Image (cartoon, rainbow, N blue to C red):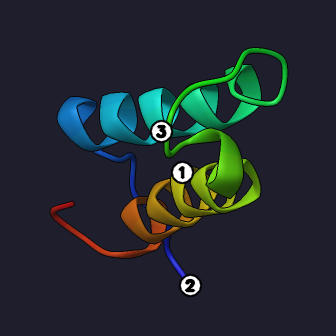
Amino acid sequence: MKLNAPTQNVWLIAVIVGILGVISTFVAIPFVTGYAFWFVTVGFAVLALASVLKGM
């Protein structure tokens, strides 16, 4: 399996979603706090998919 570098936009989206999830465990952010685990999981999954799929 050949891995590819994610595009800058996808990488930035994944990092922002992940950081929102982490920050919401310490600070109450409406909607995000209840789903903090899933925000971090989705951020990681987007980053992993972008590394595997070409052109993402």
Residue furthest to the bottom in view is 1
How far from the left and from the top, in percent, is residue 55? 15, 63
Q: Helix, strand, or loop for circle 2?
A: loop
Dividing the picture into quadrants, the one containing residue 38 is: bottom right
Q: Which amino acid does label 2 sit on?
A: Met
Residue topped by disc 1: 43
Quarter of the image with the N terminus in it: bottom right
Up-down relation of residue 17 to residue 37 (above or below): above
Dividing the picture into quadrants, the one containing residue 54 is: bottom left
Q: In this view, does 23 lie to the left or right of 42?
A: right
Give the Cα separation between the discs numbered 2 and 3: 27 Å
Q: What residue type is labelled 1?
A: Gly
Taking depth in this image into account, of 19 and 36 the one nearest to the observer is 36
Give the Cα separation between the discs numbered 1 and 2: 22 Å
Q: Do the residues bearing badges 1 and 3 touch, measured as CB atoms within 8 Å?
A: yes
Camera-nearest label, 1 or 2:
1
The earlier-in-sequence mark between 2 and 3 is 2
Quarter of the image with the C terminus in it: bottom left
How far from the left and from the top, in percent, is residue 9? 19, 34
Q: Residues within 10 Å of mark 1 (few under 14, many from 20)?
A: many
Residue topped by disc 2: 1
Residue furthest to the right in view is 26
Residue topped by disc 3: 17
How far from the left and from the top, in percent, is residue 14? 44, 42
Q: Helix, strand, or loop for circle 3?
A: helix
Dividing the picture into quadrants, the one containing residue 53 is: bottom left
Q: Do the residues bearing badges 1 and 2 touch, measured as CB atoms within 8 Å?
A: no
The earlier-in-sequence mark between 1 and 3 is 3
